[in-house]
Amino acid sequence: MEGGERFELVLEDAKTGAEWAIVVLYREFHPRILRYLRAQEPAEGEDLAAEAWLDAARNLRRFKGDERAFRRWIFTIARRRLIDFRRRRSRSVRALGVWLERGAPPDSDGAGAPALAASETEAALARIASLPSDQADVVLLRVIADLDVEDVARILGRKPGTVRVLQHRALHRLAEQLKREGHPVTR
């Protein structure tokens, strides 16, 4: 979105429920939120993004800040929905273990398997998703959400130096992975 003044006007109207303003916010921020969540949970990205927007809509009137703060706020909500989903899923692991012991094929139709990357962007997101979760979070929030180190540190509850180290390690891992796959890597 261009210009802080324009964002403030859109935000104020969105807080009053003006549909056009909500659409502007959605169009501006949704694609990045969706890419972030799809990279983390390919099969659940759409649902998690919808949950994040519902939470944002419920709490929009209480939000205070500029466009940068809004981006940080909406990605914090998206990350919390992701964490909630993973907690729910981890509770289901015991049930899956019982099914496996009984010989039932897990996810036999493949619906829960990550989709094959159809484009370079999807392939890159798949590589990022293969990183340890803290490193993937940092890379996705820095690249897709376009947040700076300080904002990512706030969202993750980490120090900026830790975020920089996680980013460095993630990029090193990705470079090594690309080398193993035969892609040229420049530094």
Image (cartoon, helix red, strand yellow):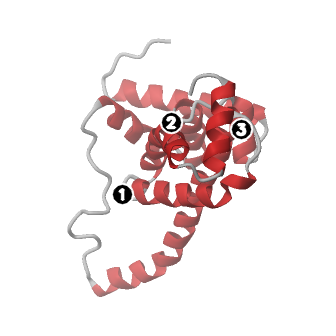
Q: Residue furthest top?
A: 187
Q: Quadrant of the N terminus?
A: top right
Q: Residue at x 43, y 83 (%)?
A: 95
Q: Residue at x 75, y 32 (%)?
A: 150
Q: Residue furthest left?
A: 109
Quadrant of the rendered image containing residue 136: top right
User: To which residue does mark 2 refer?
Assistant: 28
Q: Residue at x 54, y 30 (%)?
A: 143
* Secondary structure state at the residue bearing disc 3: helix
Is the residue under label 3 in contact with that under label 1 (CB below 8 Å)?
Answer: no
Relative side of 59 to 36, left or right? right
- Residue 43 circle label: 1
User: To which residue does mark 3 refer?
Assistant: 69
Amino acid at circle 2: Glu
Rounded to the nearest angstrom, the CA distance separating label 1 from label 3 is 29 Å
Q: Nearer the viewer, mark 1 or mark 3?
A: 3
Q: Could you classify mark 2 by the number of other residues whose Cα lies within 10 Å: few (under 14), some (14-19), or many (20 or more)?
A: few
Q: How many marks?
A: 3
**Front position in the image: 180 or 147:** 147
**Front position in the image: 148 or 12:** 12
Up-down relation of residue 161 to residue 136 (above or below): above
* Secondary structure state at the residue bearing disc 2: helix
